[in-house]
Image (cartoon, grey):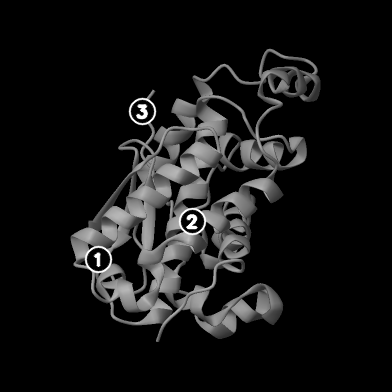
Amino acid sequence: MKINFDRNAEKRRETKEELEAGLSNDSLADNEINENYDNFALAGHDRVEEFMNEVQELELDNEIEDYESYINEESDENREALSEIEQIKEISDFIDSLDEINFENWKDLEINERIVVMQNIEKKIAEITNRSPLQVELERMPSGVRGAMDWEKQKILMNQDLVSSESINDLHHALTTLNHESRHGYQMYNLLISRTELNVEKYEEWRKNVMEPPGYINAGLFGFKRYYMQPIEVDARDFSEAVMNNVKLRGK
């Protein structure tokens, strides 16, 4: 089965006023509007139909009468998996322990050394969340896009300008983005390979978001507000922010 999640979909920005008409100020940060709106997107209108056709080939719940019972049974073998709170603590503790993210040390790293640090973080996140790690790579991206997760190629793509920046705020954004895209990898691993997520309700939200029509909502096709509020994105955003709330970036 071939599924390609590509952030290079045609983008349509809505104005801040249009967005705030439908979202409260508490749920929509200005920096998210400007810089992190099109991660994990399907590429192009023709890909939506193709993607949904491919999803239908999966043997999911179509032939299972009691789906909730089924996913509970399927998750029994994964009871040793960590809860979300435990995942957040272990990931944030690991990142916080790294000398390399002390900003004084980070500034001395070449860009290739910085991406090695990020790859090591992704490897640790994968270990904590019981999945295979994705390859972390740099890529030239528009200024409004911080990163993306390409499931087909098993990669996390980071905006090269963001990673090379000499700003401590951009280091924070880069680490948040890495956690955001890594969380998408965890979501897709659960949906397409093996379920390890213990929260039944959360897993069902992901499944419906990705596996049922209209599928993953692309900002360029459906508008930013629907993209931003879909369960897959809300979860990745909340998870990455919870991790980074427990990481203390040091230095100036």
Under circle 2, the secondary element is helix
Under circle 1, the secondary element is helix
Q: Give the residue displayed 52% in from the left and 24% down from the top.
A: 56
Task: Give the residue at the far top of this rendering.
Answer: 63
Q: Is residue 91 above or below residue 228?
A: above
Under circle 3, the secondary element is loop
Instruction: Judge by depth and name the residue closer to the eye, 125 or 227.
Output: 125
The label shown at residue 198 is: none
**Res. 229 image quadrant:** bottom right
Measure the alpha-carbon separation of dots 3 and 2.
24 Å
Question: In the rendered structure, which amino acid carries the disc numbered 2?
Answer: Asn
Indicate left or right for 217 with 230 as reference: left
Question: Can you give x and y, in whole percent of width and height, for residue 46 in the image?
Answer: 36, 42
Indicate left or right for 216 with 171 as reference: right
- Are the residues tagged 3 and 2 within 8 Å (C-beta)? no
In primary-sequence order, the first of circles 3 and 2 is 3
Circle nearer the viewer, 1 or 3: 1
**Which quadrant of the rendered structure holds the C terminus?**
bottom left
Question: Can you give x and y, in whole percent of width and height, for residue 213 in the image?
Answer: 59, 39
- Residue at numbered disc 3: 2
Question: In the rendered structure, which amino acid carries the disc numbered 3?
Answer: Lys
Q: Give the residue displayed 56% in from the left and 66% down from the top.
A: 244
Q: Give the residue displayed 56% in from the left and 43% down from the top.
A: 214
Query: Within 10 angstroms of label 2, few (less than 14), some, or many (20 or more) residues?
Result: many
**Res. 28 image quadrant:** bottom right
In primary-sequence order, the first of circles 1 and 3 is 3
- Residue at numbered disc 2: 179
The label shown at residue 160 is: 1
Question: In the rendered structure, which amino acid carries the disc numbered 1?
Answer: Gln
Question: Can you give x and y, in whole percent of width and height, for residue 198 in the image?
Answer: 71, 34
Indicate left or right for 193 with 43 as reference: right
